[in-house]
Image: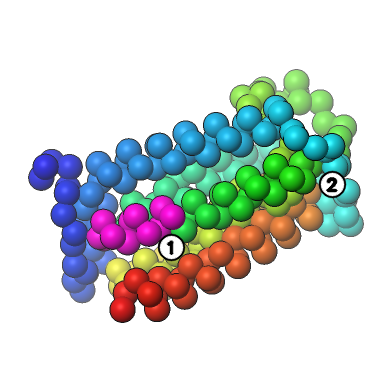
Amino acid sequence: MKMCGNRDCDDGVSFSKNAVMRLWGHWCLKAIGTMTFMAIFFSLYLYLLENPFFLITQMPFTVVDTKIGFQPYFLSLYLSLWVYVSLVPALMKTKKELLYYGAYIGSVCAAGILIYLVFPTSIPQNGINWSHYPEFSMLKTIDTAGNAFPSLHVATAFFSLFWFDRELKHMHAHPSLLWLNGLWCLGIIYSTMAIKQHVFLDVVGGLILGGVFALLTLRYHRVKVLH
């Protein structure tokens, strides 16, 4: 059981020590839980992508989309979301908080899935010849132009921004790490438009979804769980 880090931890004064203890605490549960969560989410997400229940609405371009050109070098930043969102539960220091956080982030994804169920959307054709960009082949094969609004890529990144900030502050992180957290999230959000995976309105929807749930869950956690 000790090999699985199956115990809660307390924070000290050293950020590096706090990080090690938090990453080690309940690491088996964190790893299995994160993989299980993603497997369930993608099963539902991809099913709705291939089997929409209602007529698909195409999201319109806005002036923002016309100003942002295709920037394929943002693909790595786009894909880094999976590392970014996994770091928050990995840094949870108690089993209780970890389980609550799983419910919180699950509520964000469930809301997004429900919207995709009743209001399926897609992004318009952008005229890019994807055969010239083989590095996008896997992404375009798995995640097509559907399930566009709101962008869950943006929603989960923005939601994680608030919780990541909370954990870093509790760990006594240097202010530079708080700025890095914000820049990483901003880069992920921008990348969704830079690689033409989403349009601006999808991003706005994702920001609203992620932001609302972040504020509600942080307040609930502070008032109901920690007291």
Span colored in magenta = 93-103
Q: Residue 189, percent across and down?
A: 64, 54
Main SS, magenta residues: helix
Residue 148 left/right relative to 64: left
Looking at the image, can residue 93 be seen? Answer: yes
In the rendered structure, find residue 59 and report the number of the disc placed on it: 2
Total numbered labels placed on residues in the image: 2
Mark 1: give few (<14), some (14-19) or many (20+) Cα within 10 Å: many
Secondary element type, mark 2: loop
Residue drawn where x is 69% and y is 32% of the image: 49
Residue identifier under label 1 = 164
Q: Residue 122, percent across and down?
A: 79, 39
**195 in relation to 215, above or below:** above
**186 in relation to 129, above or below:** below
Name the kind of residue labelled 2 in the image: Met
Q: Residue 39, percent across and down?
A: 47, 34
